[in-house]
Image (cartoon, rainbow, N blue to C red):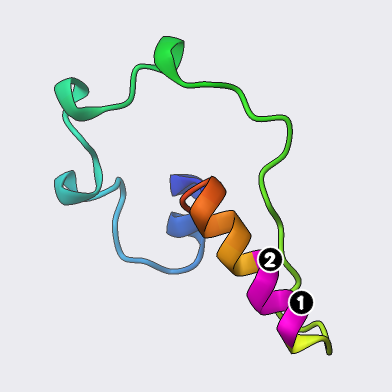
Amino acid sequence: MTHETLLSRGIPFSSLPDSYVRPPSERPRLSEVLPFRAIPIIDLASPDRSDVVRQVRHACASYGFFQ
C-alpha cells in the first residue's frame, strides 16, 4: 500500500508519520537484495486447509513471509 493509498483511506495525515519511515541507514540496500522470480501468494480462502497450511509453512521457511 502506498502512502497515497493510506492517505486516501481517510487517515488524517498529510504525510506518513516519522515512525513509519526508516532512516536511510536502516533501509535495505536494493543492490544487495536478491531478486525473486515469484513471491509466494497463498489463497487463504482455499477449501483445502491442509494445502494452505503446507503452503504457508513452505513460504515462511523458504522466504520468511507470504502474501
Determine which quarter of the picture holds residue 7: bottom left
Residue found at x 64% / y 77%: 53
Name the residue carrying label 1: 51
- Please state which of residues 39 and 10 is positioned toward the viewer in this rendering: 39
- Please state which of residues 3 and 19 is positioned toward the viewer in this rendering: 19
Res. 32 in view: yes
Percent of width and height locating residue 45: 76, 84
Residue 5 is marked as none
51 vs 63: above or below: below
43 vs 34: above or below: below
Name the residue carrying label 2: 55
63 relative position to 40: left or right: left
Residue found at x 60% / y 22%: 35
Q: Are marks 2 and 1 in contact (CB under 8 Å)?
A: yes
Q: Which residues are magenta?
A: 50-55
1 vs 35: above or below: below
23 relative position to 46: left or right: left
Percent of width and height locating residue 41: 71, 57
For the stretch drawn in magenta, the main secondary structure is helix
- Please state which of residues 23 and 46 is positioned toward the viewer in this rendering: 46
Locate the C terminus and report the quarter of the image it occupies. Answer: bottom right
Residue found at x 72% / y 65%: 42
66 vs 11: above or below: above
- Residue type highlighted by circle 1: Asp
Percent of width and height locating residue 50: 73, 84
Res. 66 in view: no
